[in-house]
Image: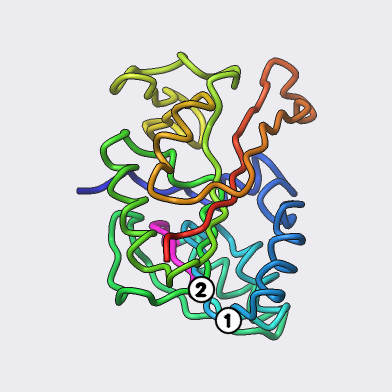
Amino acid sequence: MTAGKGWDWEQALTAMPGRWTEVADELFSFANELRRRRCRQVYDLGCGVGRHSVFLAQQGFEVTAADISSSAIEQTRANLRAADVEARLQRLDMTEWPFADDAFDAVVAFNVVYHARRDQIEAILAQIRRVLRPRGLLLVTFKSTLDSECGQGQALAPFTWAPTAGIEAGIAHYYVDADEARRLLENFELVSMVHKQELPLAGDNERHRAHWVIRAIAPG
């Protein structure tokens, strides 16, 4: 089972400079919570060019990072080297989980798990639960049904569409409302769920981005 192809990250960085290199605001408080709980092992699922892997490594965490895109892994490796920090890197589809049970204290899944059909997302979340230690932390984002691209592109499944052009052409996007987000995470304890709506990027005035940003705890 494969969720989909990865991005060409050279193209992505050219199309949206800065967007994929700046650390998301939510990571700062999440890192503080990890320190408070004395967490060490963190998995950055769908690491992209390593913006969060580098940040977490700089904060002293032992980071494992993976992405399906070979260009993402190359960029992450270069960014880790430039920052003089280390992480374990693997090229993996997000449906591949070659990790032992209870391997990580935390999982960061930022802008990644919704690139799949619902049944695949359920399987990915079950794997996250498996590799998290009891009471381990999850930071995950989902696409909101209020995003302007909900319903646009090629229909793949209920609430699932793929853009037909651009860097995400052919890549699935599953959109959820608050109730569906809660259903997907019914096997976790929800800590917070924030609906984040972003201002349009320069030159992209018709595009309105909306995500759910969720913190959850694995059962234990």
- In three-dimensional space, the C-alpha distance between marks 2 and 1, rounded to whole angstroms, equals 6 Å
The amino acid marked with disc number 1 is Arg
Label 1 near label 2: C-beta < 8 Å? yes
Q: Is residue 21 above or below residue 204?
A: below
The residue at 37%/67% (across/down) is 91
The amino acid marked with disc number 2 is Asp
Residue 65 part of the magenta segment: yes
The quadrant of the rendering that contains the C terminus is bottom left
Q: Which residue is mark 1?
A: 40
Q: Which residues are magenta?
A: 64-70
- Looking at the image, is mark 2 or mark 1 earlier in the sequence? 1
Q: Which residue is mark 2?
A: 105
Report the disc number at residue 24.
Answer: none
From the viewer's perspective, is 180 left or right of 25? left
Q: Is residue 84 above or below residue 50?
A: below
Residue 85: quadrant of the picture: bottom right
Q: How many marks?
A: 2
Q: Position of residue 194 (x, y in %)?
A: 67, 37
Secondary structure of the residue carrying tag 1 is: loop
Q: Is residue 67 above or below residue 169?
A: below
